[in-house]
Image (cartoon, rainbow, N blue to C red):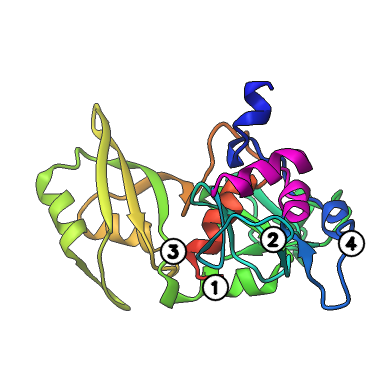
């Protein structure tokens, strides 16, 4: 037996697709054998998934499963392999997009400006942006047609962290970092960063990473301006577990099953 077969796991999952979601044969009650659900999610072959179950590495709704033949609802069961969430088979689409500077965060624009909708017009499914980035900002946007996930990701109660890298004027020092972390007064109320990290200082400029969980308009720009360091360039580099990485401006990619699983966990789905 090869190592690949004897030690399957969620690390190498293939992206979910509509085909995978629709190919699961369910019983009259909608339940499907657990190993079929795992195989459809790209965890491994049916046999490899049976070995995972027998080894006690799979849990359903928080309960370890070691018996073959257990049936689950693939749409609602919370399944984990080695503690990692396996997203449910789904007809929905999930993408990460690197929004370029100057592109409007709308699906269409009556003024004819370049917009996010232009960048996804070739997709075979209709998707919508999750939250916004102002026109002068760039970086990570999530796109999906999953309304329930969109609502959770954008609702303030879930406090989804968003990471930005800002190129600011002046040499941001300890005092400014402290103020950002402890809170600054803005016109619409106080705001504070979850984390602040100086990445680089060069000449009369500073490259700083700021993490916030609020979604107020121009929040990071206004916070940095309030401590005396106006933003010259702002890039969102992560939303929760999803990172921009090396995605080039204007390009998109499907979320990996690991990213999707961690997003679902983050917002309690």
Numbered disc 3: secondary structure: loop
Numbered disc 4: secondary structure: loop
Report the Cα–Cα distance between label 1 and label 3.
9 Å
Residue at label 4?
A: 25
Report the Cα–Cα distance between label 2 and label 4.
14 Å
Residue at label 1?
A: 152
Point out the frontmost of discs 2 and 4.
4
Asked if 168 appears above or below 226 in the picture, the reply is above
Rendered location of residue 157, percent (x, y)? 42, 77
Crowding at label 4, few (<14), some or many (≥20) Cα neighbours within 10 Å?
few
Please report whichever mark, 1 or 4, sits nearer to the chain's N-terminal start: 4
Q: Are marks 2 and 4 in contact (CB under 8 Å)?
A: no
Asked if 269 appears above or below 238 in the picture, the reply is below
Q: Are marks 2 and 3 in contact (CB under 8 Å)?
A: no
Q: Is residue 41 magenta?
A: yes
Report the Cα–Cα distance between label 2 and label 1.
17 Å
Rendered location of residue 30, percent (x, y)? 82, 73
Residue at label 3?
A: 160
Q: Are marks 1 and 3 in contact (CB under 8 Å)?
A: no
Crowding at label 2, few (<14), some or many (≥20) Cα neighbours within 10 Å?
many
Q: Is residue 59 magenta?
A: no
Residue at label 2?
A: 88
């Amino acid at each position: 037996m090869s190592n690949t077969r004897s030690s399957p796991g969620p690390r190498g999952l293939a992206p979910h697709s509509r085909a995978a979601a629709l190919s699961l044969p369910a019983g009259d009650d909608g339940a499907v054998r657990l190993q079929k659900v795992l195989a459809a999610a790209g965890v491994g072959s049916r046999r490899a998934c049976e070995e995972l179950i027998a080894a006690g590495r799979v849990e359903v709704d928080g309960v370890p499963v070691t018996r073959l033949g257990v049936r689950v609802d693939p749409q609602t069961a919370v399944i984990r392999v080695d503690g990692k969430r396996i997203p449910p088979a789904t007809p929905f689409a999930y993408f990460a997009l690197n929004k370029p500077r100057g592109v409007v965060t709308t699906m269409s624009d009556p003024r004819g400006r370049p917009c996010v909708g232009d960048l996804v017009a070739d997709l075979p499914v209709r998707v919508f942006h999750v939250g916004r980035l102002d026109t002068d900002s760039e970086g990570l946007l999530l796109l999906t047609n999953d309304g329930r996930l969109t609502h959770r990701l954008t609702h303030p109660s879930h406090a989804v962290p968003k990471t930005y890298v800002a190129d600011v004027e002046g040499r941001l020092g300890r005092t400014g970092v402290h103020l950002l972390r402890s809170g600054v007064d803005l016109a619409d109320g106080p705001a504070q960063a979850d984390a602040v990290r100086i990445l680089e200082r060069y000449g009369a400029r500073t490259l700083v990473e700021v993490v916030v969980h609020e979604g107020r308009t121009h929040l990071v720009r206004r916070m940095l301006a309030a401590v005396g360091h106006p933003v010259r360039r702002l890039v969102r580099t992560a939303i929760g577990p999803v990172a921009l990485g090396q995605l080039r401006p204007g390009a998109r990619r499907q979320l990996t099953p690991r990213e999707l699983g961690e997003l679902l966990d983050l917002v309690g789905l």
